[in-house]
Image (cartoon, helix red, strand yellow):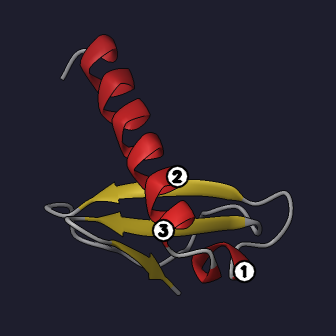
């Protein structure tokens, strides 16, 4: 995947996430102020959160955004 393709994919996921939060405002309540969002593709295995920043909220992206705790 080229940098341009990677950027386009991330921008698309970001807009999909914003639409999801607008449709489900309660989803925003679980995100701490100042947190960094990390979107993980549905086909990528989820490993432990070791090595992620303290204020990172991870989401596995399929057809629905699912927060990983």
At which x and y percent is residue 47? 36, 75
Q: Report the disc number at residue 66.
A: none
Numbered disc 2: secondary structure: helix
* Residue 64 vs residue 47, the one in the foreground: 64
Q: Which residue is mark 1?
A: 29
Name, please, the residue furthest toward the bottom.
69
Q: Residue at x 76, y 60 (%)?
A: 35
* Mark 2, other Cα within 10 Å: few <14 / some 14–19 / many ≥20: few
Q: Nearer the viewer, mark 3 or mark 2?
A: 3
Numbered disc 3: secondary structure: helix
Q: Give the CA distance from mark 1 to mark 2.
A: 13 Å
Decide: is 60 above or below 27.
Answer: above
At which x and y percent is residue 36? 68, 54
Name, please, the residue furthest toward the right.
33
Q: Residue at x 13, y 61 (%)?
A: 43
Of the image marks 1 and 2, the number of the one nearer the N terminus: 2
Q: Are marks 3 and 1 in contact (CB under 8 Å)?
A: no
Name, please, the residue furthest toward the front.
23
Horizontal arrangement in the rendering, residue 3 relative to residue 20 (left or right): left
Q: Give the CA distance from mark 3 to mark 2.
A: 9 Å
* Residue 11 vs residue 58, the one in the foreground: 11
Of the image marks 3 and 2, the number of the one nearer the N terminus: 2
Q: Are marks 1 and 2 in contact (CB under 8 Å)?
A: no
Q: Residue at x 84, y 57 (%)?
A: 34
Numbered disc 1: secondary structure: helix
Q: Which residue is mark 2?
A: 18
Horizontal arrangement in the rendering, residue 34 relative to residue 39 (left or right): right
At which x and y percent is residue 2? 23, 15
Q: Report the disc number at residue 23.
A: 3
Q: Residue at x 31, y 12 (%)?
A: 4
């Amino acid at each position: 995947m080229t940098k341009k393709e990677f950027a386009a994919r991330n921008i698309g996921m970001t807009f999909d996430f914003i639409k999801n939060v607008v449709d489900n405002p309660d989803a925003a309540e679980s995100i701490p102020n100042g947190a960094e969002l990390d979107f993980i593709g549905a086909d990528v295995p989820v490993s432990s959160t070791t090595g992620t920043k303290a204020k990172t909220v991870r989401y596995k992206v399929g057809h629905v955004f699912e927060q990983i705790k």
